[in-house]
Amino acid sequence: MRLAALALLALALVLVALLSSTYFVRVATESMAPTLLVGDRLLVVRRAVLPRRSPRRGQVVVFTAAGDRSRRLVKRVAAVGGDTVPADRGTALGARRREVAVPPGGLYVLGDNGRASHDSREYGCIGTDRVKGRALLVVWPPGRARRVRCAPPRA
């Protein structure tokens, strides 16, 4: 009986730890297609429990929108502080694009679907302090359930 109670307590502690370190986000736009589709539900690991290093190139992160801190955006990290983004992937300046130097503590984020994504090409680099977590799994719909892979960003 005592062993069963300890096992139940251990399970409860694991569940509390898991629930306090993760949350769910619904993909609301086509910006990450075909990797993530509208309506996909993601399991996100909170930044607070990730190793203290900054997000890495290719990871899918969840961050707050600049004008609306309650709004969460999902994009792939294309470049990190110290990187230079080539002009063909850089920030729009009128009808032309320009090369971008990512500042220390900054990230250049892109949607996998460049034609439908509002991302760093429009609003520039974001601070790593705005990153709230890293997408770990697609959990809904069940037929699309899988791990979110770290991959090179697409143009």
Image: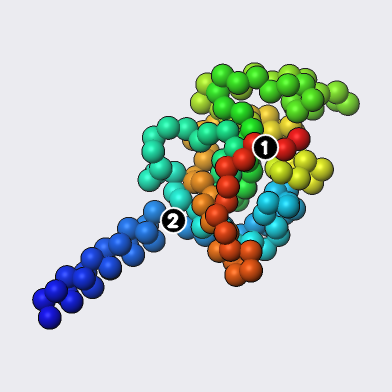
Q: Residue at x 72, y 38 (%)?
A: 154
Say if residue 68 shows up in the picture. no
What amino acid type is highlighted by mark number 1?
Pro
Q: Residue 92 sits in which quadrant?
A: top right
Q: Which residue is mark 1?
A: 153
Q: Position of residue 3 (x, y in %)?
A: 14, 74
Q: Position of residue 67 (x, y in %)?
A: 63, 42
Q: Position of residue 41 (x, y in %)?
A: 59, 62
Secondary structure beneath label 2: strand
Other-residue count near label 1 (Cα within 10 Å), few / some / many at <14 / 14–19 / ≥20: many
What amino acid type is highlighted by mark number 2?
Thr
Other-residue count near label 2 (Cα within 10 Å), few / some / many at <14 / 14–19 / ≥20: some
Q: Which residue is mark 2?
A: 22
Q: Nearer the viewer, residue 43 or 96?
A: 43
Q: Nearer the viewer, residue 77 or 94?
A: 77
Q: Residue at x 69, y 23 (%)?
A: 85
Say if residue 13 shows up in the picture. yes
Q: Is residue 83 left or right of residue 113?
A: left
